[in-house]
Amino acid sequence: MLMKTLNFFLLAILTILFLQQNNISAQVQINMDVTPLEIAEHFIGPGIFAFDNVTFQGPWVSKGLFSGADSTLLGTESGFFLTSGTGFFIPGPNLSGITGSNNGAPGSAVLNSIATQTTFDAAVLEFDIMPVNDTLKFNYSFGSEEYNEQVGMSYYDVCGAFISGPNPAGGFYTNKNIMTVPGTTNTNVSINSINNGNAPAGVIPTGPCTNCWYFLDNTGGLDMEYDGFTTKLLCRISVIPFEEYHIFLGVADVGGGGKDSGIFIEEHSLFSPGAAEFTSFNFYADINPALPWDVTGIINDSSVYLEVPADVDVSNLIASYTESGAYVSLNGVTQTSGATANDFTDTLIYQLQSHEIKDWTVIVELVTDVPEVYFDRVIISPNPAKGKIVLKHINGINIKICDSQGKAVTEVKSLENFSTLVSGELSPGIYFIELEKDGYKQTRKVIVN
């Protein structure tokens, strides 16, 4: 394999000079000064109940965040990357067909399982998650300097997304690779499985086509250096709600090495889609100083109704909400629960996107004598649920879950040191959840499918 011969610092200087001389501004921005946890946080999207145990294998230059990318190339403007080389070589323009580096990292036994030779220079992100719904999916693009001159060779860089955890069909997923060519179950994504033929460096390939409808040539491109990319691809797998799964994302050099390859994951695209529904919508006083107390929204069909004291300025309130697993936007702007402030003077139309797209009307009315509700912050979701019910913000509250006949199936006393409770497996039916604290009681109904 052709090895990198140009000194890294010299190439970096030449790149800067080239950009200055040609006044090129259309270029992806790279940030490698981030922790593995920060990268995972940029990956997590709707419908993920929890994530933990984040680890990274590889040098610091082989992972990072990207922004300002050409969306016609990666299919997204921002996200994170893992590379078998260095992030310094990702931004364009595409000056060379042989750019790359050996970053000195070891390989990966998991990636070896899909490689034609032993791997090295691996960059691997791993963590555990708990999905809310029955599907996990995310979007990504693969890019490489091995395009187009190494297409058809017996060795090529590898990438993979491996899942371990309970299989809904029975048994257990053990490092199941879901980063495969669309329409296949076991064809790994690489320069050999998605391309438009072999061509010398700097020459646009003309075939023969191998899944070339997923291929984008970047010869002479301005935004990024790699010579070729896949279009935005989808990873998808069936899961069991509220079970734990281990995620392994990685890319590595194979054979002689030298030329960089990378995977580019769309921001917040790790998604467990559910119903396009709000399960709660609240204004909490601790993040809204204008409020004297927490305000709980009343949800009815596709509307949310909230009453706040008449003297409260509602032009800059932060809503905290839960959803069944949907992306939330308002006037085309992505919303973040507990962080995004909006003007609620007039009725607002939120849009939730999941299996379907659904609009939600949020109405805030100014009234006098609004009482404080004792169990305002308790969230019970999802509803309807599948097997298990999750209760949040239940510190110090006694919990009793009863079936439709009034028989207690779960009873927990004085949860002083816990804020979240996940019920055991529940049979399909209607359940009533009794909340009790200091003599005050409230009962809520949940349906389990």
Image (cartoon, rainbow, N blue to C red):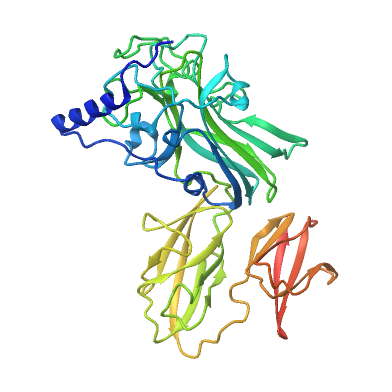
Q: Position of residue 313 (x, y in %)?
A: 37, 80
Question: As drawn, which residue projects farthest toward the left?
Answer: 21
| The C terminus lies in quadrant | bottom right
Quarter of the view holding residue 309:
bottom left
State left or right for residue 351 relative to residue 99: right
* Image quadrant assignment for residue 427: bottom right
Residue nearest the observer in this picture, 190 or 271: 190
Q: Residue at x 41, y 80 (%)?
A: 290
**Up-down relation of residue 278 to residue 291 (above or below):** above
Q: Which of 388 and 172 is in front in this view?
A: 172
- Is 286 situated above or below 45? below
Tell me which residue sits at (51%, 14%) in the image: 255
Q: In which quarter of the image is residue 405?
A: bottom right
Q: Residue at x 59, y 73 (%)?
A: 377
Residue at 60%, 39% (x, y): give it.
247
Q: Could you tell me residue 211's position as x and y percent?
A: 47, 19
Give the position of the N terminus as an image quadrant: top left
Asked if residue 197 is positioned above or below residue 144 in the image, the reply reads above
